Image (tube, grey):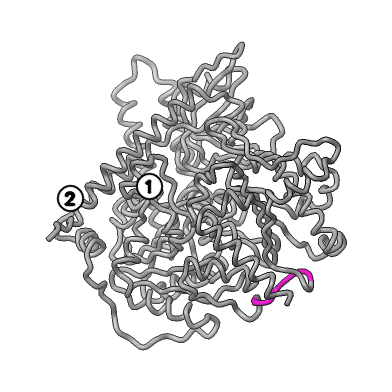
Amino acid sequence: MSHIPTSVQSLMQQRILLEIEYNCEKELFRRQTELVGIQKKVKRGDAWFPIRTGKSYYNSLNQLAVEIFQTSDSDIEHNFEYNRPVCFFTIHNGSIKYLSINGTVSYAESNRMVVTVPDNNSIGELQRSEHIGVQLFFDETSYRMMFEALDRTINAKNNRLAYLRDLFYSQQKAQTFTFAAIRFPWLNSTQEQAVNNVLRSKDVAIVHGPPGTGKTTTLVEAIYETLHRESQVLVCAQSNMAVDWISEKLVDRGINVLRIGNPSRVNEKMLSFTYERRFENHPDYPLLWTIRKTIREMRQNRSKRSTENYHQKIERLKSRATEIEIRINAELFGEARVIACTLVGAASRVLSGMKFATLFIDEAAQALEAACWIPIRKVSRVVLAGDHCQLPPTVKSIAAAKGGLAKTLMERLTENKPEAVSLLKVQYRMNDSIMRFSSEWFYNGELESAPITKHRGILDYDSPIDWIDTSQMAIEKENCEEEGQNIHFREQFVGENFGRINKDEAQLTLDTLLAYFNKIGKERVLSERIDIGIISPYRAQVQYLRQRIRKKDVFKPYRHLITVNTIDGFQGQERDIILISMVRANEDGQIGFLKDLRRMNVAMTRARMKLIILGDAPTLTKHPFYKKLLGYIKETKEREFY
């Protein structure tokens, strides 16, 4: 009989894989830092150059913060967000020099961010330097937190953490309470069942929410109901954006949320429930600020002949400051019903020593298992929500991914604890024809469309889903020999880390959109605010499409309605019309990471009323998924029109 690995052995294996991923990412970062030019980093959204520094000040957490402004106009979406580490550099005569100062993003907007830096004289170096820039730095902290969480979990004995660890890696059934179902007339039957299953679970519950099935609505209801039974819960997600989204919905429900860390979108509503803003607004804060300022001034003006009296004074002030800080924290955490943060944020100093009965993890299918153990250490039971048939976590090392690092805790639990899973089955987003293929391929055909969305469309007698085969377009163009243009709809490779581009397909995508606008009518598009998403799996194609839209005056009236982004950038969003530019077109049928079908599931299910796929059928249909998809689209069109 084959030896079944114990939970501890499995987690040790996870740790080895995480180590491989850590080394791979570190090496990748080193190579990119040395080899990739600054302009390319700027284009990828990983750097700003040139920048200017604004004011510096001490924030409410007593960290030295400095404002950074991007001085060149850019529509490139940057990747700077709360808690990401950054480093600074200068460029003189084409050569790059890294400054000794590193920092952490406190928050970032489109062309301004606030960075916290170590409290020493290095900020002077930053403010004196010319031709400076800032770029993302290797994120050592997140890895450190994940390794620490795995070690704690591996070594846990005779406690709740050890129990959950062993349960999650066994076939043993999760324990539940028994009580009559609570009615929620405003939810559908599968949502209602999911909330009841969460309330009944003693150990673990999973809310599996396919696209458009109201996962957030269900989760908010489950949290709201749990708070009738518990005084406080911990709510986490992998990304800041996902934490913001669920926090905002909870605040709208009238729940007191305390958001640890800063939001990804900097607006008054979001900032108002952050820990930092609440801390600053506390009536005792001005006194604390004055004491901290006095300590700093005393240290700066300290002479060599400092007396013992000086040390006593400093110690007295420090203990007074600590006392006030503890009092403010006790009040803020005492009032809050939901503590919300990212998974890594759960290791924050302000949460140390805190325990919760229940942890809710949203977008759990996008999180590495190691990251989930960071908050699990603080709780008695876990509720995971997400969809493992959509975006997976990002794993850079192929060896680590093959070894199982990309397999999430949610996926593992869905397999070995089917009794803990509630599948939401009614979708409220898409026309039924757009939803049907996804349902059959990914969800065993179990999804159904709500009557309100089943037949939604923009034009009468219009197929909700089209595939424009660029190989056919290439033949047509060749036959026309239009002005001797060389139009062949082939992909090009642009740079090792920037990906692929298909310029003819990009042009066709925009022509197709304009033709559809003309069919609908400009007035109607604008008055009804019909919104459009253009998606491409490749970032180079996204940048190229954005440039083309910016340069073409014909798109000017519609620009506020059009979003162009990668699949990852569209996670959790929806649009009336979606166009997907697939890019890949080659003789060998190579489709690269388009083989990750979960990404395609995300892209297709963003569309409410119209989905247009543009791609080279001979290249893509060598893969069974795309072959089936093309057949389904042809069948659907025949059914619609005959």
Q: Quadrant of the C terminus?
A: bottom right
Q: Label 2 belongs to which residue? A: 155
**Residue at the spot x=48%, y=52% of the render?**
596
Q: Is residue 31 above or below residue 203?
A: above
In front of the other: 446 or 573: 446
**Residue at the spot x=65%, y=71% of the render?**
636
Q: Is residue 629 above or below residue 279?
A: below
Q: Quadrant of residue 380?
A: bottom left
Principal SS element in the magenta part?
loop
In front of the other: 349 or 397: 397
Q: Is residue 455 magenta?
A: yes
Where does residue 302 sit, x and y in percent of width and height?
A: 40, 20
Identified by mark 2, the residue type is Asn
Identified by mark 1, the residue type is Ser
Q: Is residue 58 visible?
A: yes
Q: Quadrant of the N terminus?
A: bottom left
**Residue at the spot x=52%, y=19% of the render?**
125
Where does residue 338 sit, x and y in percent of width and height?
A: 44, 63
Q: Is residue 246 magenta?
A: no
Where does residue 35 sit, x and y in percent of width and height?
A: 50, 22
User: In the displayed structure, does residue 86 sit left or right of residue 630?
Assistant: left
Q: Label 1 belongs to which residue? A: 348
**Residue at the spot x=48%, y=61% of the render?**
257
Q: Residues within 10 Å of mark 1 (few under 14, many from 20)?
A: some
User: In the displayed structure, does residue 342 sit left or right of residue 519?
Assistant: left
In front of the other: 140 or 168: 168
Q: Earlier in the sequence, mark 2 or mark 1?
A: 2
Where does residue 442 sit, x and y in percent of width and height?
A: 47, 66
* Residue extent of the magenta highlight: 454-459
